[in-house]
Image (cartoon, coloured by chain):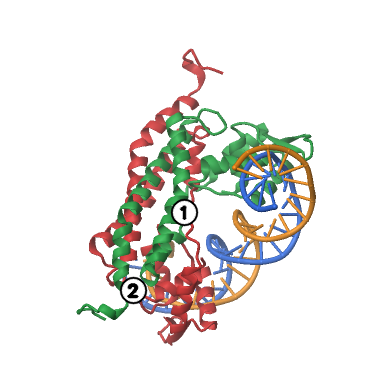
Chain colours: A red, B green, C orange, D blue
DNA sequence: AAGGCCATGTAAGTTGTTACATGATTCG
DNA sequence: CGAATCATGTAACAACTTACATGGCCTT
């Protein structure tokens, strides 16, 4: 699945500019998808070329014209076709967990910092998901569809579990690796190997 | 973080061939990292060129020489340096959740199939993680380090939550979207737009 | 004054995937 | 007989990220 399909998808919920689509991704998709301007703008250009969206320019004073995109009926059909053909993959790429995996090679303070940083980055994401779950309202003010509610509920369950796990096992991990790194000054007997 | 660093990392746990490294990724890393031969072999070639690993060839009858890689002391230093410089990101890219997000545009049977497929793909991953958690033994027979245990515990907690959530909300979602798609034959009154 | 928000877009570079190329052995 | 396992490697391609280019307004 590429950014084009995603753009088409969010545009079925209402007309938007490229900038707003980016916001939308950050608000509602951040826990399972990411896209930057560098991929969104070219995607919109291509969709326009293919006739799957139309755009109208809105003049603004002292900044580039705003370009508002709308899905065409053809675009809707293409979206459904694309969704039907998309294999339902699910990939996690976590340098965080890789780092944890090799925690015994790193200074405990560094590991502690890594964990705290991760916790801090997850928090606003969880907060936004929780807001969507509880209010049933998207950031743009529209009520959520069933799928959005499911995805948000999933996010809450999974991120909640992640936060709980990391918070409750952080100190245990830190204690354990502290022993590894500790210089052999007070060397307790029995260090096998 | 690139595949080179990962290879360096798993090689600190013991000498391996490229093929075994791939297995290792599948067994222990699959829930947070992925890499194919197309990236592993070039990575090992580059590490060798940089002097961060050495390799010895083992002749085999009727198949390509096995090439066993070992980390050099220089490689260990490079690994730590690399790990210390790695920002602890954590990204999920889930076409599965995107599809769910737009579930209201798809036939309910299709959504049901998607969900079942995902559940089926998660199961062996969870099983392997659970095995690591419970036995404390890596697939290659080595006892796990603290970090590995933490990562495995994380995987169990998070994948467990994902499975629970998806299993217990599947029918609710399906019921809800079935109403959308239902043709207006028996049209119940009150279908607001 | 610095930085964030609004607003669009391009180009170079990174990184990895897929498919290909080769080939014997073993299991069902 | 087909598929999986063992074993390595290359090359074309896809896709996205980062940095750059532009520029005013508003808040701290």
Left or right of A132? Residue B102 is: right
- In whole angstroms, how far apart are the C-alphas of marks 1 and 2? 33 Å
**SS class, disc 1:** strand
Residue with the mark numbered 1: B91
Task: Tell me whether marks 1 and 2 sit on the same chain.
Answer: yes
Residue C11, image x, y percentages: 64, 71
Please tell me whether residue B125 is drawn above or below residue A6 in the rendered image.
above
CB atoms of marks 1 and 2 within 8 Å: no
Residues A49 and A84: in front is: A84
Residue A43, image x, y percentages: 52, 74
Which mark, residue B30? none
Residues A148 and A70: in front is: A148
Residue with the mark numbered 2: B181
Which residue is farthest left?
Answer: B189
1 or 2: tag closer to the N-terminus: 1
Left or right of B29? Residue B155 is: left
Mark 1, residues whose alpha carbon is within 10 Å: few (<14), some, or many (≥20)? some
Please tell me whether residue B171 is drawn above or below residue A49 in the rendered image.
above
The residue at 20%/79% (across/down) is: B190
Q: Which picture quadrant has residue A55?
A: bottom left
Which residue is farthest top?
Answer: A189
Q: Which picture quadrant has residue B154?
A: top left
Q: Which chain carries label 2?
A: B
The residue at 42%/72% (across/down) is: A9
Please tell me whether residue B45 is drawn above or below residue A153 in the rendered image.
above
């Amino acid at each position: 699945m590429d950014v084009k399909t995603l753009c088409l998808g969010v545009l079925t919920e209402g007309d938007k500019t490229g900038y707003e689509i980016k916001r939308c991704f950050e608000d509602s998709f951040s826990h399972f998808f990411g896209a930057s301007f560098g991929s969104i703008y070219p995607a919109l250009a291509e969709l326009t070329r293919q006739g799957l969206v139309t755009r109208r320019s809105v003049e603004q004073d002292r900044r580039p014209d705003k370009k508002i995109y709308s899905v065409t009926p053809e675009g809707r059909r293409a979206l459904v076709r694309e969704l039907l053909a998309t294999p339902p993959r699910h990939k996690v790429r976590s340098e965080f967990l890789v780092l944890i995996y090799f925690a015994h090679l790193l200074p405990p303070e560094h590991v502690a910092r890594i964990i705290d940083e991760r916790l801090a980055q997850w928090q606003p994401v969880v907060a936004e998901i929780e807001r969507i779950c509880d209010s049933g309202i998207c950031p743009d003010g529209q009520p959520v569809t069933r799928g959005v509610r499911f995805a948000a509920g999933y996010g809450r369950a999974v991120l909640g579990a992640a936060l709980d796990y990391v918070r409750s096992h952080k100190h245990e991990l830190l204690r354990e690796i502290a022993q590894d790194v500790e210089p052999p000054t007070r060397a307790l007997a029995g260090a096998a190997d």
